[in-house]
Image: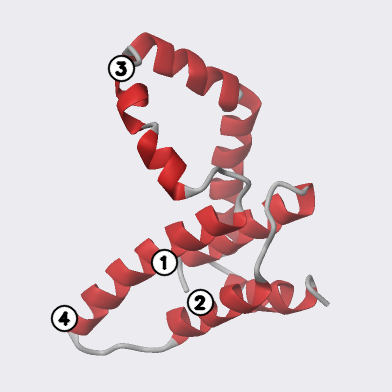
């Protein structure tokens, strides 16, 4: 699954914090779709594009964010924000400790991934956590 392991690890982490309401059946079906091998280049590119869109939509569906229609209706208002204000809002949402933790988690993943099949543990967690 490659980098998709990080996606599911992040979702499991957010679920453990109560920030995400995971739909386990959809996540397991998504994992199955990711695990299916695709040999030819064209279908593989199409599948990769579709899985990125599906991953974003699934994460949005499971989050506490407003419905997509409301978010789109507010887009003209968001576009009036100055870059300085957007940076300030980002600073309120993402703390320095969160950014450092994410970078450290990424580094740890890439180190561990060299010796351990992380996909196996992610699959076990995706099945075990809802049980």
- Residue at 72% across, 79% down: 127
Give the secondary structure at mark 2: helix
**Circles 1 and 2: CB distance less than 8 Å?**
yes
Give the secondary structure at mark 3: loop
Marked residue nearer the N-terminal end (2 or 4) = 2
Q: Which residue is mark 4?
A: 42
Marked residue nearer the N-terminal end (1 or 3) = 1
Q: In this view, which residue lies farthest toward the left?
A: 42
Give the secondary structure at mark 1: helix
Q: Which residue is mark 2?
A: 30
Q: Position of residue 3 (x, y in %)?
A: 46, 63
Q: Which residue is mark 1?
A: 54
**Circles 2 and 3: CB distance less than 8 Å?**
no
Q: CA distance from mark 1 to mark 2?
A: 8 Å
Marked residue nearer the N-terminal end (2 or 3) = 2
From the viewer's perspective, is 64 left or right of 38?
A: right
Task: Give the foreground label among 2 and 4.
Answer: 2
Q: Can residue 14 be spotted in the picture? A: yes
Q: Which residue is mark 3?
A: 80
**Circles 4 and 3: CB distance less than 8 Å?**
no
The correct choice, above or below, for 57 with respect to 66 in the image is: below
Can you say which quadrant of the picture contains the C terminus?
Answer: bottom right
């Amino acid at each position: 699954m490659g980098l998709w392991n990080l996606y599911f690890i992040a979702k499991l982490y957010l679920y453990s914090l109560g920030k995400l309401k995971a739909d386990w059946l959809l996540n397991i079906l998504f994992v199955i779709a990711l695990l299916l091998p695709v040999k030819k280049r064209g279908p593989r590119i199409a599948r990769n594009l579709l899985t990125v869109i599906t991953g974003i939509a699934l994460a949005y569906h499971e989050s506490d964010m407003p419905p997509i229609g409301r978010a789109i209706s507010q887009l003209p208002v968001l576009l009036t924000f100055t870059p300085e204000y957007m940076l300030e809002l980002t600073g309120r949402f993402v703390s320095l400790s969160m950014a450092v933790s994410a970078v450290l988690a990424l580094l740890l993943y890439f180190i561990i991934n060299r010796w351990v099949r992380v996909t196996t543990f992610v699959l076990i967690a995706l099945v075990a956590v809802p049980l």
